[in-house]
Amino acid sequence: MAEYKLLLPSMGEGVMEATIISWMFNEGDTVNEDDSVVEIATDKVDSDVPTPVSGKIIKILKQKDEIAKIGEPIAILEVAGAGELIAEQTQEPKSAEEVKTQIPTIEPEVVKGLEEAMANLTSSIGESDLYLSPLVKSIAQQEKISESELQTIKGSGLEGRITKEDILSFVANRTAAVTPQAAAPSTPAVVSAPVKVAAGDEIIQMDRVRKIIADAMVKSKHTAPHVTSFIETDVTNVVKWRMKHKDLFEKREGEKLTYMPIFVKAIVKAIQDFPMINVSVDGDKIIKKKNINIGMATALPDGNLIVPVIKNADQLSLSGLAKAINDLAFRARNKKLKPEDTQGATYTISNVGGFGNLMGTPIIPQPQVAILAVGAIVKKPAVLETKDGDVIAIRNLMFMSHSYDHRVVDGSLGGMFLKHVHDYLQNWDLDTEI
């Protein structure tokens, strides 16, 4: 028998750590290969971690609500067999002479240079014993938070560690405060008004997902100057086309045909017309994205929100989009999404019409630079131009609102993009194949 360390696997780009939500097995339990053994949560999505080997759990290293870093052991399993890995772990240790002969010789000049570099590094970071996760370090660097400021943040994590929520809250509060150096002598510091709790008020603690959403929304508003353009679109052709094909499509594919794949198809075409909408901002650099990955804001049964991503949406047919959208929506509502399902979006759509709303002003998911909200489709009288003159007819109309980051998207680009989405939907070809 040998011991096997179960490591926290990579959860995708930008994810450095995860919180243990619950263990599905206890110490002493036997698990089989590919069994899901622990449920974890990142700032992207909740997920299960399977074990790649069969064995008995002899030690759980990370308990409920503790944080584990990617690649860190979270449990020890007792496994049978003697594979190469086990043999390597149990081989006789090398003698001191064998080890000594394998140590490379380093020139004195190189050693001196390394010592000087380490001395400079030590002096630059001070003697602080403050522990920061890679994710928190990245945010601190991006927001230019000094070490003295970090020392003032009260961590809510394990052993007082600073979590992502702590540092984002600090950033949000810091922007509201006026420093003494920057403020005029007569300008008082901005202080948030305390919230008074009256008799009968109920205090509800935010859950983990709601806190993540709150932090992300505040950060987005702090990062990007939002501008929103509106347009009303006649989607009568879209409604007629869907009514014609939805029953046939469901019978043929076993899938519902909603309006969302049609909206996504129009967005993809508009992005191809205006690729500078499909970008991100990194300091003073604009990153133009090659792939077109459409995020789809999805409401969850508990009232929270998640944004699964349709990868390479430009390479999918209408039928392919419908299947991808239905699959992501189903798995989102049943907590079956994988971490990679919520990563890599380059543009997002939000269907506020699903709640009966005519329009909305959506907040941009960072690091994207734009988001489209589609409202409810409503029958209204509208003026139509015909060869015999103007007439009033009953049409299916829908408002769309396009929020964009004014740092890199001016009104002309944001407005023309929205107009192209409008044109593609309003002139939808009734002979389009599905």
Image (cartoon, rainbow, N blue to C red):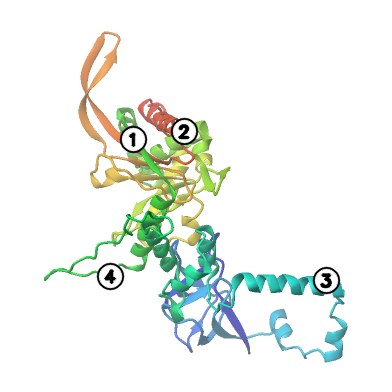
Q: Amino acid at mark 3?
A: Val
Q: Check disc 2 and report the residue beneath it.
A: 270
Question: At which x and y percent is residue 286?
Answer: 56, 43
Q: Amino acid at mark 1?
A: Arg
Q: Are marks 1 and 2 in contact (CB under 8 Å)?
A: no
Q: Residue at x 83, y 85 (%)?
A: 99
Q: Is residue 170 left or right of residue 57?
A: left
Mark 1 vs 2, N-terminal side: 1
Q: Residue at x 39, y 37 (%)?
A: 262
- C-alpha separation, residue under disc 1 versus residue under disc 3: 71 Å
Dot 2, crowdedness within 10 Å: few (<14), some or many (≥20)?
many
- C-alpha separation, residue under disc 2 versus residue under disc 4: 42 Å
* Mark number displayed over residue 369: none
Mark 1 vs 3, N-terminal side: 3
Mark 1 vs 4, N-terminal side: 4
Q: Amino acid at mark 4?
A: Gln
Q: Is residue 357 visible?
A: yes
Q: Check disc 1 and report the residue beneath it.
A: 242
